[in-house]
Amino acid sequence: MKKLEYSDDGKCVYGGRAVKGRIDFPEGVTEIASCAFMDREKLRSVTFPNSLVEIGRQAFWNCQSLTLDALPQNLRSLGIGAFAFTGVHGSLTIPSGVTRIESQAFKGCNIWSVSFSPKLTEIGSCAFRLNNLLHEVELPKGLKKIDFGAFELCDELDEISFPDGLISIGKDAFANCPLKSVFIPASVVEIGGGAFVGTRKIEVAPENPNFITRDGVLFTRDMTTLVSCPQGLELSEYRVPDGVTTIAARAFDGCKTIEKIVLPNSVRTIGDDAFRHCDSLKAADLPDGLTELGLSAFAYCSELSIARLPESLVAIHSGVFEECKSLTSVTLPSKLETIPFRMFDACESLERIELPAGVTKIEESAFYRCLNLKEVALPAGLTSIGSHAFYRCSPELELDVPDSVKEPVETFWKKFDPEED
């Protein structure tokens, strides 16, 4: 027999022993505490009293069998992850008293349509992420902010209409949603990197002072940042306009038809994942003047065979060429001091590489799974090689490890025998 645990005044439910099946919360309860029913795999349904105004952080987190008839009409607060990874499905109505949906509130559920409170002003980070059946969303007129990843990976969401007055669309907000088209209102002042990865078409209100499209590509109004290239353009070649200084995070992510990209010398920064999964891209000839190359900037470019990194580069982040399986030729800046984490992981066609004389550190898994790597001359001033840096390379690889390297050889280099794999 299940027994709920209450606060002394009976208004807050803290949890319960042997909770399974169905819970009918009694009238008079105003709050369900944080983590009250977290991970209760046998909890299948709940009904809430009209007196309930607050559902705490992770109150029903990971109750995978839990379904929900309706949220109480007087609810005012939904905590972080309140119903994340539950069995909540179907149509969901957010009560009129809720002004903000906290992060991860309904992450990983099976909701297919949402009706929002007219008073709602903010949708928190990852609030509806991974709702694979979600296809109907009508955003309220008073909405001001959609936080990062709010609707990311909602595989069926192909339409969205933004209200006038919306100010901010966060990083990855609609990433990997198959949106047919989006129209950016004049009020929007912020669009995070990757917000529209997977979107087919982007348009901007002509009076918007912050953003503009040119030939279908989204830029900041001053044309210094390329924000997003819609996949629906299906370009084979693209020349970034002169004057652009920043390629935003995930700007070309998933543009599978692009074979050639021409970057002007004005570009200083290439953001994280900027060209990730550009499956047809053949070469990365990066411009002189580039100073920063972001995390996984060219990762998973399966046809990329040539890469030239300019002398101007100051910061190279991890995983830049990870899983570039056709990469055969790389030119590194002569002043480079560190080969970052997973920089060349799974570059299976790379047979030889020349490391600059000033390299002092090779980070973890830098050349992991370079199955055909046969020749690497380690610089004399090298002092550190991270774990698995040269694991699963060609059996023909021989390393002359300088005495200055502190780590034991077996932690970063192990002869690879394909027959033992």
Image: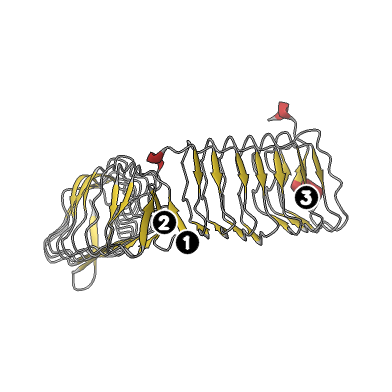
Query: Left of 350 or right of it: where is 201?
Result: left
Q: For this rendering, which residue is in front, 31 or 21?
A: 31
Q: Position of residue 222 (x, y in %)?
A: 42, 63
Q: For this rendering, which residue is in front, 250 or 21?
A: 250
Q: Secondary structure at mark 2?
A: strand
Q: For this rendering, which residue is in front, 139 or 395?
A: 139
Amino acid tagged 2: Phe
Identify the mark nearer the N-term, 3 or 1.
1
Amino acid tagged 3: Leu
Q: What is the number of the mark on residue 224?
A: 1
Residue at 39% across, 53% down: 218
The residue wearing badge 2 is 219
Which quadrant holds residue 207?
bottom left
The residue wearing badge 3 is 355
Amino acid tagged 1: Thr
Q: Are marks 3 and 1 in contact (CB under 8 Å)?
A: no
Q: Closer to the camera: disc 3 or disc 2? A: 2
Rounded to the nearest whole Å, what is the CA distance between mark 3 and mark 1?
33 Å
User: From this viewpoint, which residue is outermost toward the front?
Assistant: 242
Identify the mark nearer the N-term, 3 or 2.
2
Rounded to the nearest whole Å, what is the CA distance between mark 3 and mark 2?
36 Å
